[in-house]
Image (cartoon, rainbow, N blue to C red):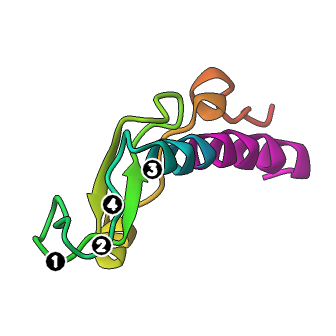
Amino acid sequence: MDVARHRARRAIANKAHAKVRKAVLAGRLPRLDGSIKCTDCDSPADRYDHREYAKPLQVEPVCINCNKRRGPAIDSHTALFPKRRAH
């Protein structure tokens, strides 16, 4: 992956993460203080997982293990600009 593509993907992810932080501070999403259970395994959730960065507030509370198991989210840059094939 070239540097420009990587930076574009990270910028989209960073914006989505920032919107979640703001929503937590504003009380629109609950703080993950150990009382919220992981959507996948019922352990205490410690993060919000994005499945699609283009929908930044559509998140699910998950634990670190389930977040790793789920893998990376889809970002709108990849959807709009798929990797080019070599000719």
Residue 24 is situated, as x and y percent measured from the top left of the image, at: 45, 50
The kind of residue on which mark 4 rests is: Arg
Secondary structure at badge 2 equals: loop
Q: Quadrant of the C terminus?
A: top right
Residue 9 vs residue 42, the one in the foreground: 42
Q: Quadrant of residue 35?
A: bottom left
Residue 55 is situated, as x and y percent measured from the top left of the image, at: 46, 29
The kind of residue on which mark 1 rests is: Ser
- Per the image, the residue denoted by label 1 is 43
Tell me whether the residue at label 2 lies in contact with that at label 1, contact meaning CB atoms closer than 8 angstroms: yes
Residue found 79% across the figure and 40% down from its top: 8
Residue found 49% across the figure and 40% down from its top: 74
- Horizontal side of residue 46 vs 18, given as left or right: left
The circle on residue 24 is 3
Q: CA distance from mark 4 to mark 1?
A: 15 Å
- Horizontal side of residue 14 vs 87, given as left or right: left
Magenta span covers which residues? Answer: 1-17
Mark toward the start of the polypeptide (2 vs 1): 1
Q: CA distance from mark 4 to mark 3?
A: 22 Å
Q: Is residue 53 above or below residue 18?
A: above
Tell me whether the residue at label 4 lies in contact with that at label 1, contact meaning CB atoms closer than 8 angstroms: no
Q: Residues within 10 Å of mark 3 (few under 14, many from 20)?
A: some
- Horizontal side of residue 78 vs 6, given as left or right: left
- Per the image, the residue denoted by label 2 is 63
Tell me whether the residue at label 4 lies in contact with that at label 2, contact meaning CB atoms closer than 8 angstroms: no
Residue 37 vs residue 52, the one in the foreground: 37
Identify the main secondary structure in magenta.
Answer: helix
Residue found 45% across the figure and 37% down from its top: 52
Residue 77: in magenta span:
no
